Image (cartoon, helix red, strand yellow):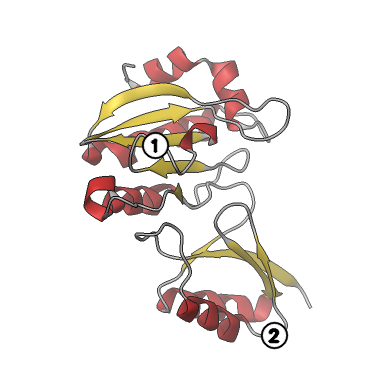
Amino acid sequence: MKRVQFAVSPEIRVGGSVFTPADMVAISQIVGEDAQIELSIFQQLIVEMNEEKAEDAKKALREKGLCVYETGSVVKNLSVCSFCKGAEIEGLEAARNLNDTIAGMAVPFTMRVGYTGCPNACGEPLVKDIGIVKRKETFEIYVGGQSKTMEAKTAELLVEQVKEEQLSSIVQSIITLYQTQGKKREKFFKFVERYGLENVRKELGLSS
């Protein structure tokens, strides 16, 4: 019998990507004992189960308030900080809106986007493909971070003083540019190096 995979994560909330005990019980009951559940590095659980049961399981998980995503070469769910200074100060709603906009977009290579609600950058956004840092009432967007291999590097500032109502559309436009101009299996930081940071700005009509 064919088996398929999908990812499960909690709703972004104060505390970060936090599963409650009720979430864990629901996941276990819904996917069943024959499923395999793996903890990934993307603040997700990867569920592998029989294909014939998978769609019903996804629907039931969503009804319990959990988020369900595809695996593979897509934008992963937003990697976030714990919002330790509170939802309003650190932009919880902005993070949720951003996640709803970009998570699951198909890309040339798996992509991680990080969000942190203050300059302490506890969510480690500067080693993500795209990183967002909230500073008071506006946001900075960084691109091209890489946390793995000997090529590890911090992301570079693409644009600052971004208003909340602009945030999701700008990040989406960056990903769309990568979708259309990136090569197959080209990592995002390699794309930024090849395409050029200034060219990304020009293409998107941004100023640093």
Vertical placement of 2 versus 88: above or below?
below
Q: Would residue 72 be found to the left or right of residue 17 on screen? A: right
State the separation of the CA atoms marked 2 and 1. Answer: 41 Å
Is there a contact, CB below 8 Å, between mark 2 and mark 1? Answer: no
Q: Amino acid at mark 1?
A: Asn
Quarter of the figure with residue 208:
top left
* Mark number, residue 120: 1
Q: Would residue 46 be found to the left or right of residue 56 on screen? A: right
Question: Residue 45: x and y, percent?
Answer: 60, 64
- Residue under the image location 24 percent in, 40 percent down: 164
Question: Residue 180: x and y, percent?
Answer: 52, 31
Secondary element under disc 1, as helix, strand or loop, is loop
Secondary element under disc 2, as helix, strand or loop, is loop
The residue carrying pointer 1 sits among few (fewer than 14), some (14 to 19) or many (20 or more) residues within 10 Å by Cα, namely: few
Question: Residue 80: x and y, percent?
Answer: 44, 49
Closer to the eye: label 2 or 1? 1
For label 2, the residue is 33
Viewport quadrant of the N terminus = bottom right
